[in-house]
Amino acid sequence: MANLSRKYAIVGVGETAVGKRPEASTHSLHLDAIRACLLDAGIGASDVDGLLTNQPLNDAHRSYAVKLAHMAGIDPCYATDLVLGGATPIAMVQHAIMAIDAGMANTVVCVHARKRSTPDPSPGFPIRSGDEHWERPWGHFSAVANHAFAAQRHMYEYGTRSEDLAEVAVSARKHACLNNNATMRKPITVEDHQLSRMIVDPLHLLDCSLESDGGGAILVTSADRARDFPKPPVSILGMGQHHPHSSLMDAPSLTTLGGKRSSEMAYQMAGLAPKDMDFAQIYDCFTITTMITLEDYGFCAKGEGKDFVKGGRIAIGGELPVNTHGGLLSQAHLEGMLHVTEAAKQLRGNEVEAERQVPDARLGIVSGHGGSLCMHATLILGAG
Amino acid sequence: MSKNQDKRNRPLLRNQPFLEEIEAKPFWTNLKEHQLTAQHCSTCGNFFRFPPQALCPRCLSSDYKWVSLSGKGIVYSHVTYRRAWHPAYQDKVPYNVSLIETDEGVRMVSNVVDCRPEEVFIGMPVEVLYEDFEDYTLPKFRPVKSS
């Protein structure tokens, strides 16, 4: 396989305001994110020839990418929908590279928006997530419970406690408090976490991410073309995916997930190791997801996540700043699109509030995780 | 907002099994007879995972039989729902949902009943019992009483 490391770059980043957006629609949030991204890149819609997106959850389309491209004035030679849950935004960047490398397009916009906090009336039908009819008859309905199964196993296998998971939530909130575009701006403590109500035991409310309205977009092109754009390019150094099961009924493990192989592929492609990373944007639909992924990514040994996340080690100023924007737990849940945009902004420098800029950030890793803990994608990004 | 839709405009979640799926029909028919069964590959001897499917996921053989499971297994992981996602469960919280690993190595979502949710633990030996509804039967599990 040809090594595409350093041959492609992110040259545009767009984010909308997040939180409650009652005036917006899913479509308008996508368009706002595309416009912000093109403005950031200093180009027009006619300069874009590819578009990747995800399907709106409440309104399944045969091809949302084609509809969206034309709503945005883009005449695409390459357009498709990717559906990998919270691994989708990273997968989009990867597919953009593959499409450009194959000669199918030159400049591809990757866009993802969600409207889950306020109503979004649509004429369509919702997307099924999977094998619900093999779960619901027994009262099993939720992503919270799928992750609670994993948390229970992690506690059983490695002695992790709820108070350890709390550290992930406390750190995310600390970063959100420094982010002007974050939903939750009030600091929390481990005690607040412990006192928050139990949703699906062993996960408390503060182990769970937000439901948000908002959108984000990323523009990808070749490293050669990237030099013509106004802002410093963010180089794509490594990437991987792994999807080790399709439901919890066939998962080989609930405590080692796709992040292990996915990150190994990405490190190998980049020629880098965990110790090289200046920060990590780690998918955090639930606190347990972040802990498992930090272990799977090799930042600590399996089962040692509980020590790794303690005492500010994953906060800005700590050993490995994690989720410097506040993450899905405290900024907004756009299925990880803002993990990618945040990583790019950190590497360009001077684009986030000074208090949450990682000093001299040169290298960062980003994870995406989706479905019933079954899908995973990784990106390693570098400045310049 | 219609009363049949939730706040995201989705139809209210169904809570009943789908009995007409071609591959899964024997599973539900056998349960009506109080037989917990799974697909067993006649070519490689593998028990299929759930949900049922047309070919063996290990060797892709289409030659399989529905065979009875012992009905015994252990709790692989468990959670306690403290809130209900569906009106049918409103008066049931807190309730247990478990991943059960049968002695044959087949894993399924079910409930451990006949004990309080906080008494369930990983590795707990359990055995099947059958809960009959008008159109279908659900397999559930209870702790094996130590003799």
Image (cartoon, coloured by chain):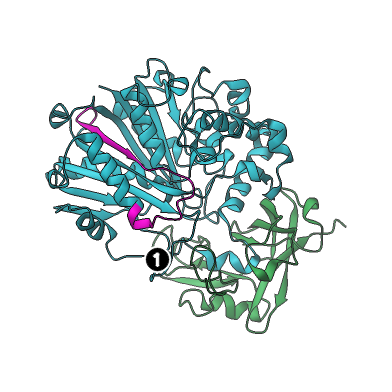
Inspect the magenta stretch and tell me whether residue B34 lies in it: no
How busy is the neighbourhood of tag 1: few (under 14 within 10 Å), some, or many (20 plus)? some
Secondary structure at badge 1 equals loop
Q: What x and y, as percent, mark residue A301?
A: 55, 26
| Quadrant in which the N terminus of chain A appears | top left
Inspect the magenta stretch and tell me whether residue A27 lies in it: yes
Q: Is residue A231 above or below residue A101?
A: above
Residue B146 placement: quadrant: bottom right
Q: Which residues are magenta?
A: A4-28
Q: Which residue is mark 1?
A: B61
- The tally of labels here is 1
At x 56% / y 72%, what residue is drawn?
B14
Task: Give the amino acid at mark 1.
Answer: Ser
Q: Kindly give the residue lying farthest to the right in the view shown.
A: B147
- The chain to which mark 1 is attached is B
Q: Is residue B6 above or below residue A238?
A: below
